[in-house]
Amino acid sequence: MTKPEENPPRKRSRFAALRASFFTGLIVVAPIGLTIWLMWTMAGWVDGWVLPLVPPELRPERYIGVNVRGIGVIIFLIFTVVVGWLAKGFFGRTMIRFGESIVDRLPLVRTVYNGLKQIAETVLSQSEAKFDRACMIEYPREGLKAIAFVSSTAKGEIAQKADDADPLISVFLPTTPNPTSGFLLFVPQSQVTYLDMSVEDAAKLIISAGLVYPQPKEAKGKDGRKIKAKLQSNNE
């Protein structure tokens, strides 16, 4: 007697196909949905802070009859541009110096203000302060590798206390999955392995906890000659 055909494997294959399609769609929809939700939430948060400061007779919904989300963001951007334009002039610089002179006389306020000002200047300034390249270092112990970002060569007292034959490189070791926090490490240049992947690709690898790997590229000098020359020129 011949055995009847079994249907369960076909059902399982159909279920597997549906599951694969679901996860494929989730990969497409999730980033778009989260981006829209984040932008919508941020716009509402800014509106909640800015619109109460706008006089009722100047609010747009009074004239169009609709409370449009994002109006507060536009007002904030215009206000920030105007303040920046005024700060570049003589009157603006004078007012800033006068205000900072008052703040410097207040112990607690001075500490908070100077700290926030330094952070803002570091994050928002359009200078060359950016990561040069992705690298690997041994961390947290010998034999284990971690991805980090090269900042620059060590300067000042840090460089003076280091070995001249093997200068120190300042690297930022980010955490997973939040790369905005991490550790500042000073590593001897001989112990830094430079990577060919871009800083953006390395950040994606860190954020995804090793799930998203960049496409392999042709080697651009694994010994890091280009980055070493750049760091030496910056140090000079």
Image (cartoon, rainbow, N blue to C red):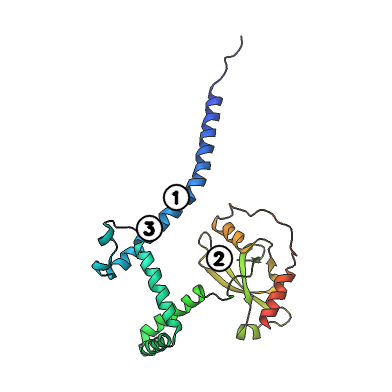
| Distance of label 2 from label 1 (alpha carbons) | 26 Å
Relative side of 39 to 1, left or right: left
| Distance of label 3 from label 2 (alpha carbons) | 26 Å
Name the kind of residue labelled 2 in the image: Pro
Q: Quadrant of residue 225?
A: bottom right
Q: Is residue 141 visible?
A: no
Locate residue 71, reporting x and y percent: 35, 62
Q: Quadrant of residue 114?
A: bottom left
Return the residue at label 1.
Answer: 33
* Mark 3 Cα shell of 10 Å, populated few (<14), some (14-19), many (≥20): some
Residue at x 25% of width, y 70% of height: 55
**Which one is in front, 114 or 97?**
97
- Element on which disc 3 rests: helix
Name the kind of residue labelled 3 in the image: Thr
* Mark 2 Cα shell of 10 Å, populated few (<14), some (14-19), many (≥20): many
Return the residue at label 2.
Answer: 174
Return the residue at label 3.
Answer: 41
Residue most extreme to the front? 63
Residue most extreme to the top? 1
Residue at x 72% of width, y 75% of height: 229
| Distance of label 1 from label 3 (alpha carbons) | 12 Å
Locate residue 48, reporting x and y percent: 31, 64
The numbered mark, 2 or 1, whose residue comes first in the sequence reads 1
The numbered mark, 3 or 2, whose residue comes first in the sequence reads 3
Q: Are marks 1 and 3 in contact (CB under 8 Å)?
A: no
Q: Which is more foreground, mark 2 or mark 1?
A: 1
Q: Is residue 123 visible?
A: yes
